[in-house]
Image (cartoon, rainbow, N blue to C red):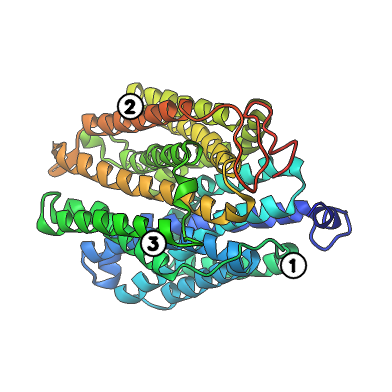
Amino acid sequence: MTEAREAISGPDAPHHPRFLVAVLAFCGVVVAVMQTLVVPLLPHIPALTGATPTAASWLVTVTLLTGAICTPVLGRVGDMYGKRRVLLASLGVLVAGSVLCAVSSQIGVLIAGRALQGAALAVVPLGISIMRDELAPARVLPSVALMSSTLGIGAAVGLPVAALVVEHSDWHTMFWASAGLGVLDIALVLLCVPESPLRTRGRFDTLGVLGLSAALVCLLLAVTQGGGWGWTSARTLGLLALSLVTGLLWGRYELRFTTPMVDLRVSARPAVLLTNVAALLIGFAFYANSLATAQMVQEPTSTGYGLGASIVVSGLCLLPGGLTMVALSPVSARISAAYGPRTTLALASAVMVAGYVVRFFTSHQLWTIVLGATVVAAGTAIAYSALPALVMRAVPVSETGAANGLNTLMRSVGQAFCSAAVAAVLTRVTFEAGGRTAPTLHAYLLVFLIAGGAALLALAVTLCLPGRRITVPGTVGRDDRTASLAQEGT
């Protein structure tokens, strides 16, 4: 493996490490942009397509569902059959979904296209796995940190760009642009990314995939649609119960399968389990920042706190946070190399808590709103950079794709719960302002309080992580403080 890494590290090699990292990070940003692309468009979808608001909401929901299912599944497929191959397939699906959305205004076709776009979320854990396999040890931490941060960077960049397109061009344009970017990604991957020789042996766990998919679909449908159906309705409670039963049966089956879709014995170890719990909480806290900021600044001035900003301005409020995430991902890697990823994640959680404290007390002026949102984004960047390092030091090399896919899934689940919680608060804590019903300022403050509480809980979970040596079959024992991911290799 060392020889393979050295062979691609020369300045004239066909797969130079710098090009590899840049290409994979660009793929991650493009995929993350796809996840938020339709958010500024949602209020206009009923008028543009003749669909109901409920049907329009599925443009976001279906992306979440397919992303949640495909991320761990394709991570596992990549471990078994080739990460580059599956990466290219994921990007191809993204292009197909983008073209579907670009050529039609029918809500059914748009939902199908968005479902395909969501499946491409697996690009991020696949990229992390390729980096672990192909890069020299000293390059792994900073490169993985950048790749992981692309989820937040793309979300922060995608909103203002999509808003500009919605206001100044035909809305199909952004889907043609996303298709073009997907084709460019495929070409760059073919040129700059090698296929990893590492493979996980065994038989593909088809029943495990189906069981995990069923449990996730039931859970996420209940969470994302529960507000409209009613949280105590038979449909919502039935789906939650079905998710629980399916999940238990799936877990029992996975424990008996020789090469399971998810190795629950490894996932149940404190180093992995607590990292995934922290990922869920960080995902919740991050998404609240984006949702609340974009909506709060657009509230009319008649509310007494709203700024009456346009869609473009609301998106631009998140742009400083996106740029901050780009700048801080290498800083996070250096902190992890010096003090260990557990310390980095704890610091990140504390920064997010501080950001929500700022937001709670300074939500009356545009510059203070942007400041608070940027502080939360800074914490998110550091956290997203540290999470893969925590996962990689605790799982065998052969399970990197599946394990990081599961960690990315937990962030998505956290975002789904956040979306439901924010919607519930903002639609129930309301008052009449300017002839319309609007959320009160206290509703937004409550959102900040809940999100800050999630970040504080993530800090508590992080402090419970094992802080010294971790030995897992197929890995090297690592000391948290020296962070030998960067020094000894993976």
Q: Which mark, residue 339?
A: none
- Secondary structure beneath dot 1 equals helix
Mark 1 vs mark 3, CA separation in Å: 29 Å
Nearer the camera: disc 2 or disc 3: 3
Report the front residue among 153 and 487: 487
Judge whether 271 appears above or below 100 on screen. Answer: above
Q: Quadrant of residue 370?
A: top left
Mark 2 vs mark 3, CA separation in Å: 33 Å
Residue designated by label 1: 191
- First in sequence: mark 2 vs mark 3: 3
Judge whether 106 appears above or below 223 on screen. Answer: below
Q: Quadrant of residue 36?
A: bottom left
Q: Is residue 439 left or right of residue 416?
A: left
Report the amino acid beneath label 1: Leu
Residue designated by label 3: 63
Q: Is residue 41 visible?
A: no
Q: Is residue 336 left or right of residue 134?
A: left
- Residue 300's x, y, as percent? 26, 40
**For the residue carrying disc 3, how many other residues have a C-alpha within 10 Å: few (<14), some (14-19), or many (20+)?**
many
- Secondary structure beneath dot 2 equals loop
Residue under the point 63% across and 45% down: 144
- First in sequence: mark 1 vs mark 2: 1
Report the amino acid beneath label 3: Thr
Mark 1 vs mark 2, CA separation in Å: 49 Å
